[in-house]
């Protein structure tokens, strides 16, 4: 018997939504007031009228337009590359029988337990040898494929693509890459969309590695936000106005692709 959710369920969902939106609203609230808003004993709960002025000051204080462009280039390129190479490698691990497949997969999964910070020094040395320190290539190339992406796509393609369909394509004369492109890629679109979104978001919010390899004149969004609070006196209205502006592209992306993302998650959840 189907039962509609009760008051407790709706109350918990409402509290969860309000709690999730509270940091963004607080950023917009502080960013829309003057710099002395945090000095008041009772901070205001209604946005003021200085948001666009504070945002304009943020764009003038640091190269924010360039930072937004750099983040879009880096995040979009990395997300697209991760989806392509992860789907290609995941298809190989899931459907192709080759020597050493299981040990390679175990090694791949084991790399997920290695902290990223352990590889920063050798990675920086490699980037310096290639002459990429200070350029966007130092961000794009190391992130073009991830172990999580390969494992994620491998797990999805195990059941999404029947072996009989691959055999039929091979019998019809398709090469292995054409079989991958015409058979595996269409079946992997829901998972690929989710992986693209998560990878884009992770790259957009990355701070540690860009801080090391990029100069102040060629920042990403997160580095530009750090520059806004690098002075002796931190103007939080300026910083949080910039933070709100930096969050807008992610919100637009999730609004445009939210339905497809939910559909992909549900399709993967009911598989099998």
Image: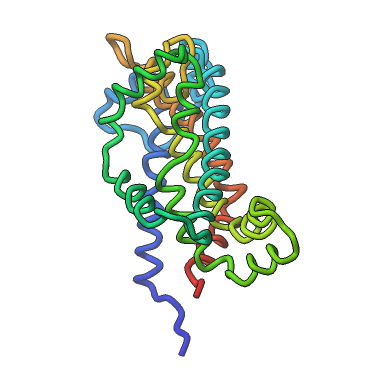
Looking at this view, name the residue that lies furthest to the right: 172
| Position of residue 247 measured from the top left corner of the image (x, y, whole percent) | 48, 34
Can residue 41 be seen in this snapshot? Answer: yes
Kindly identify the residue that appears in the image at 67 percent across and 52 percent down: 181
Can residue 238 be seen in this snapshot? Answer: no
Kindly identify the residue that appears in the image at 35 percent across and 63 percent down: 12
Residue 126, image quadrant: top left
Q: Is residue 171 above or below residue 2?
A: above
Q: Is residue 34 above or below residue 190?
A: above
Looking at this view, name the residue that lies furthest to the front: 99
Kindly identify the residue that appears in the image at 52 percent across and 39 percent down: 250
Q: Nearer the viewer, residue 135 or 229?
A: 135
| Position of residue 260 measured from the top left corner of the image (x, y, whole percent) | 60, 56
Q: Is residue 214 above or below residue 190?
A: above
| Position of residue 215 measured from the top left corner of the image (x, y, whole percent) | 42, 11
Looking at this view, name the residue that lies furthest to the bottom: 1
Q: Horizontal placement of 51 versus 117: left or right?
A: right
Residue 14, image quadrant: bottom left
Q: Nearer the viewer, residue 176 or 196?
A: 176
User: What colour-coding does the image apply?
Assistant: rainbow
Kindly identify the residue that appears in the image at 50 percent across and 65 percent down: 158
Say how many tags the image has: 0
| Position of residue 217 measured from the top left corner of the image (x, y, whole percent) | 47, 9
């Amino acid at each position: 018997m189907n039962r509609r959710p009760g008051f407790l369920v709706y109350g918990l969902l409402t509290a969860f939504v309000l709690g999730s939106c509270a940091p963004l609203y607080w950023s917009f609230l502080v960013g829309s007031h003057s710099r002395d808003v945090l000095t008041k004993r009772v901070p205001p709960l209604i946005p003021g009228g200085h948001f666009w002025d504070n945002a304009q000051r943020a764009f003038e204080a640091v190269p924010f337009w360039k930072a937004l462009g750099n983040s879009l280039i880096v995040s979009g390129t990395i997300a697209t590359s991760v989806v392509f190479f992860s789907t290609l490698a995941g298809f190989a691990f899931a459907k192709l029988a080759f020597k050493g497949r299981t040990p390679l997969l175990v090694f791949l999964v084991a790399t997920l337990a290695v902290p990223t910070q352990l590889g920063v020094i050798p990675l920086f040395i490699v980037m310096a040898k290639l002459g990429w320190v200070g350029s966007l290539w130092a961000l794009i190339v190391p992130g073009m494929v991830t172990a999580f992406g390969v494992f994620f796509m491998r797990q999805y393609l195990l059941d999404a693509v029947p072996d009989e369909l691959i055999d039929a394509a091979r019998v019809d004369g398709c090469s292995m890459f054409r079989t991958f492109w015409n058979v595996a890629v269409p079946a992997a679109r829901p998972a690929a969309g989710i992986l693209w979104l998560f990878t884009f978001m992770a790259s957009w919010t990355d701070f540690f590695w860009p801080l090391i390899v990029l100069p102040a004149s060629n920042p990403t969004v997160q580095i530009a936000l750090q520059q806004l609070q690098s002075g002796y006196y931190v103007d939080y209205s300026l910083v949080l106005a910039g933070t709100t502006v930096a969050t807008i592209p992610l919100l637009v992306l999730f609004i445009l692709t939210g339905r497809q993302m939910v559909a992909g998650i549900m399709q993967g959840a009911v598989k099998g």
